[in-house]
Image (cartoon, grey):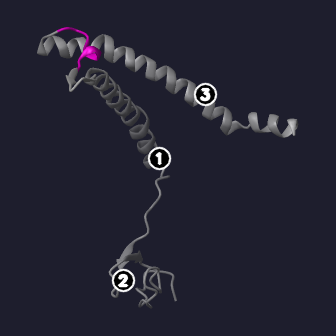
Amino acid sequence: MVKEFKEFLLRGNLLDLAVAVVIGVAFTAVVNAFVSNLITPLIKALFGGSTQFKGLSFTLHGSTFIYGAFLNALVSFIIIAAVIFFLVIKPVNALMDRMGMTPKEDPLRECPECLSKVPEAATRCAYCTSALAPTGSGSGT
């Protein structure tokens, strides 16, 4: 049992995941510091007021709503999402396109009975099970 646990801990994908989580937490801390120390004061300078964005709040019937902390978290999320999209997703997609590794979608056609989208090579609809005429371009018989 101890041997199995050791093998589980030393699996490559588990270690990769652990490293990704640690790097993600560190990156989040950097982005949060960037937002609270640079972006927030810049926004406050443009619109006036104090430089403590996270201290913004209002009170309604004795309940305090701290919307400044939410705004900080929202700006942090948008920055993290933009960095991931522009520095990870877009380059990987471009690389996969260049290497010809982008998965090709099967052509679809409409089932005449239920109007569902089915693969062009299908000879029977997966939704209503009606028989479909072969299109000639598929491998169905």
Q: Residue at x 57, y 24 (%)?
A: 22
For this orientation, the residue located farthest to the left is: 47
Placement of 65 over or under 121, stated as above or below: above
Answer few, some or many: residues within 10 Å of disc 2's Cα (few below 14, many 20 plus, some between 14 and 19). many
> Where is the N terminus found, in terms of image quarters?
top right
Answer few, some or many: residues within 10 Å of disc 3's Cα (few below 14, many 20 plus, some between 14 and 19). few
Q: Is residue 56 left or right of residue 48?
A: right
On the image, the x and y values in percent for residue 107 come to: 40, 71
**Disc 3 marks which residue?**
19
Dot placed on the residue nearer the N-terminal end, 2 or 1: 1
Rounded to the nearest angstrom, the CA distance separating label 2 from label 1 is 33 Å
Residue in front for this viewpoint, 79 or 109:
79
Q: Amino acid at mark 2?
A: Cys
Residue in front for this viewpoint, 9 or 106:
9
**Disc 2 marks which residue?**
111
| Residue range highlighted in magenta | 50-57
Which element carries disc 3, helix, strand or loop?
helix
Which element carries disc 1, helix, strand or loop?
helix
**Disc 1 marks which residue?**
96
Placement of 103 over or under 53, stated as above or below: below
